[in-house]
Amino acid sequence: MEKNVRPADIDLIYIATPWSLHAPMAVYAMNQGKHVCIEVPAAKTLDECWQLVETSERTKKHCIILENCCYDFFELLTLNMSRQGLLGEIVHGEGAYNHDLLNSNFKKGGYYEMWRLKENMRNGNLYPTHGLGPVAQVLDINRGDRMDYLVATSTNDFSMGAKAKELAATDDFYKEYANKTYRGNMNVTTIRTEKGKTIMLQHDVSSPNIYSRIFKISGTKGSVIKYPDPERIAFGDEKWISEEEFKKIQEQYQPPIIKRVGELAKQVGGHGGMDFLMDWRTIDCLRNGLPVDMDVYDAALWSAIAPLSEQSVANRSKSIDIPDFTGGSWKTNKPVDISLAKGGNTKVKL
Ligand SMILES: NC(=O)c1ccc[n+]([C@@H]2O[C@H](COP(=O)([O-])OP(=O)(O)OC[C@H]3O[C@@H](n4cnc5c(N)ncnc54)[C@H](O)[C@@H]3O)[C@@H](O)[C@H]2O)c1
């Protein structure tokens, strides 16, 4: 990148490159006076997580993690339900990125220079934020509670090494991938919070699973689960509420952001509309001087779960302390207002 290129008309830079470029590009952009939005995960190492925090604080530029799953319709409904007390005290959450990417990861001409396959030579939960983001928001992580420590376990690899060898047998292109060690099929990471809540995350991109982010939230009065379809809600007696009751709750607890731009988001699309909702909300916060929903402390913390889980896996699932990137501010920070969407002034032209 050329030095000292500072176009006056750029306010915000989106970074959607391979993971190893996220933090260096974000740090560079903030140092040039630009706000940044970074694809997930925002950083790969703990050092990079701290660099994001330190640079954002020093330059006073927003560093926003693009965790679009926080803006999916059921996740927003759940956040609003939990904020209104319908689920009682939230005790436990589960999230995942279980997505069969075995063929995609090995596809020639697919990911840029096979970057995603190479990332899978690390062992841990490499992609925690889709599952974790919405759960962390419901649990008020960094805003009333904090993650204390984690324990991670991985299975052996039963698919990727075998796939590499199979492809290399007939195609020299794959020879360099044939004798490598790959991450285990499944990684399970459990997190305990300072206030005694728990989070369970799964990560599997090489088994023939049906796509799932789980998204289970358990409270003292109710619980929800998103995957496998359909989304369900329960308030006890070991039964899910009926479709009719579900619709009533949906109407009553529909967050204002969905009422305001939900239909438009569905029309525009982008993972069913959640990408549009995230972008709309981000711009709305910036234009109205509102705190962003997913700040640099979330970016650092949610991304840090990958390297911390690698440390735990490498040490027989030893428990690993999770840094407090907020420097103690989690005790007084107020919960995010994502589902209530105060703002809402930004007009959208299609
Ligand atoms: N949030 C989501 O739902 C979601 C979905 C897909 C991908 N992603 C994330 O988006 C990012 C990109 O993933 P992808 O699937 O598009 O990968 P990809 O390999 O298809 O695209 C990567 C892009 O980065 C560009 N690039 C590489 N080096 C560069 C450099 N030095 N400078 C500028 N550009 C460079 C490449 O030309 C390519 O266009 C990843 O972080 C991934 O995790 C997120």
Image: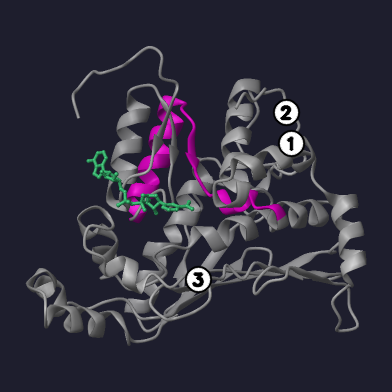
Q: Secondary structure at mark 1?
A: loop
**Residue type pointed to by label 3:** Leu
**Circle 3 residues within 10 Å: few <14, some 14–19, many ≥20:** many
- Could you say where residue 228 lies in the image, as x and y percent from the top left? 65, 75
Which SS type dominates the magenta stretch?
helix
In front: 130, or 122?
A: 130
Ligand 1 closer than 8 Å to the CB at disc 3? no
Q: CA distance from mark 1 to mark 3?
A: 32 Å
Residue drawn where x is 33% and y is 15% of the image: 7
**Circle 1 residues within 10 Å: few <14, some 14–19, many ≥20:** some
User: Is residue 26 at all visible to an observer of this figure?
Assistant: yes
**Residue type pointed to by label 2:** Gly
Q: Residue under circle 3?
A: 150
**Discs 3/2, front:** 2
**Circle 2 residues within 10 Å: few <14, some 14–19, many ≥20:** some
Report the span colored magenta. 45-73
Q: Residue under circle 1?
A: 341
Is 130 colored magenta in this rendering? no
Residue 246 in the figure: left or right of residue 67: right
Q: Is the residue 256 above or below the residue 213 in the image?
A: above
Q: CA distance from mark 2 to mark 1?
A: 7 Å
Q: CA distance from mark 3 to mark 2?
A: 37 Å
